[in-house]
């Protein structure tokens, strides 16, 4: 298991990689957004060189705001083009994975048409990634209404698509954690995990233990291990990085205890 962090796009990416390596992180999720990680203005080969220098594994995280669900075909095409450029940037910096956020489909489409639209969208994106040696993963959102059902259908239709499981998202407006449910359905597609805490009402991206009704970190890690997961876990947390460091240490300590 490797612990990672998300870059802050308000800071230069190379500086973020240096900080991560200095503080014991071996994985860096690169948030591909402005001002310091915009697709069109970042020297992605230099980013890759910095990662290799520090022995850090990079993962590309495509912008969450790309409106693939917009009713306008021209807007949707532009969003797809940006996602393809995200794959290109991942290849340039030597990342073998780029992750994308689930945003659904245009509201005027029915459920079956929505599945078909998503199949076409991710079929194009996965093929683009395969041609460049980059896997494409889909991240569950914090909107848990019927989402697991949608994911089952989507992943069945797009064989090459991978899963980024966001455990914090699976704790929002749910009766219980969704982690085990997603893993029962899609453990064979899981390639990466995000973790943060919240109060069950919104995706606050808090450090562990910040709220009384937050996630049970030990239980979540135990669930991952029960499905034989031993991959990368990125701590996707906002705020002072002192708490990020404490959470990373907690994950490292708990991991060998929850076999």
Image (cartoon, grey):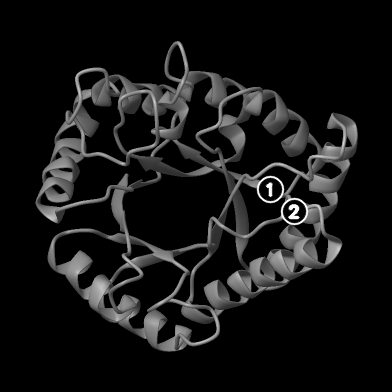
Figure quadrant of residue 130: bottom right
Instruction: Look at mark 1 in the image and give the residue it sits on.
Output: 161
Q: Nearer the viewer, residue 226 or 61?
A: 61
Direction from residue 88 to residue 75 in the image, left or right? right
Nearer the N terminus, badge 1 or badge 2? Answer: 2
Figure quadrant of residue 49: bottom left
Q: Residues within 10 Å of mark 1 (few under 14, many from 20)?
A: many
Q: Residue at x 57, y 20 (%)?
A: 184
Question: Vertical placement of 201 versus 241: above or below?
Answer: above
Question: Vertical placement of 12 versus 144: above or below?
Answer: below
Q: CA distance from mark 1 to mark 2?
A: 22 Å
Give coordinates of residue 240: x percent, y percent. 14, 53
Q: Nearer the viewer, residue 152 or 201?
A: 201
Figure quadrant of residue 59: bottom left
Give coordinates of residue 249: x percent, y percent. 13, 43
Give coordinates of residue 255: x percent, y percent. 24, 33
Direction from residue 219 to residue 58 in the image, left or right? right
Q: Residues within 10 Å of mark 2 (few under 14, many from 20)?
A: some
Q: Which mark is residue 86?
A: none
Give coordinates of residue 75: x percent, y percent. 76, 65
> In the picture, which quadrant includes the N terminus?
top left
Instruction: Look at mark 2 in the image and give the residue it sits on.
Output: 70
């Amino acid at each position: 298991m490797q612990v990672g962090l998300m870059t802050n796009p308000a800071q230069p990416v190379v500086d973020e990689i240096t900080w991560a390596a200095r503080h014991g992180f071996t994985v860096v999720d690169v948030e591909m957004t402005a001002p310091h990680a915009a697709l069109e203005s970042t020297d992605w080969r230099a980013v890759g060189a910095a990662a290799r220098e520090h022995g850090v594994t990079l993962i590309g995280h495509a912008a969450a705001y790309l409106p693939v669900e917009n009713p306008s075909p021209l807007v949707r095409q532009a969003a797809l083009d940006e996602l393809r450029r995200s794959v290109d940037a991942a290849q340039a910096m030597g990342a073998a994975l780029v992750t994308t956020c689930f945003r659904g489909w245009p509201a005027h489409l029915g459920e079956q048409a929505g599945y078909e639209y998503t199949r076409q969208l991710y079929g194009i994106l996965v093929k683009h990634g395969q041609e460049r040696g980059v896997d494409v993963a889909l991240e569950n959102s914090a909107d848990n209404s019927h989402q697991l059902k949608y994911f089952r259908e989507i992943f069945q239709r797009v064989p090459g698509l991978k899963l980024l499981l966001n455990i914090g998202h699976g704790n929002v407006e749910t009766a219980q954690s969704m982690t085990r449910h997603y893993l029962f359905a899609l453990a064979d597609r899981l390639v990466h995990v995000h973790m943060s805490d919240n109060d069950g009402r919104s995706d606050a991206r808090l450090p562990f233990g910040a709220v009384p009704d937050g996630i049970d970190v030990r239980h979540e890690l135990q669930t991952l291990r029960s499905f034989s997961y031993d991959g990368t876990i990125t701590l996707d947390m906002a705020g002072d990085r002192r708490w990020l460091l404490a959470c990373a240490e907690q994950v490292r300590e708990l991991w060998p205890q929850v076999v």
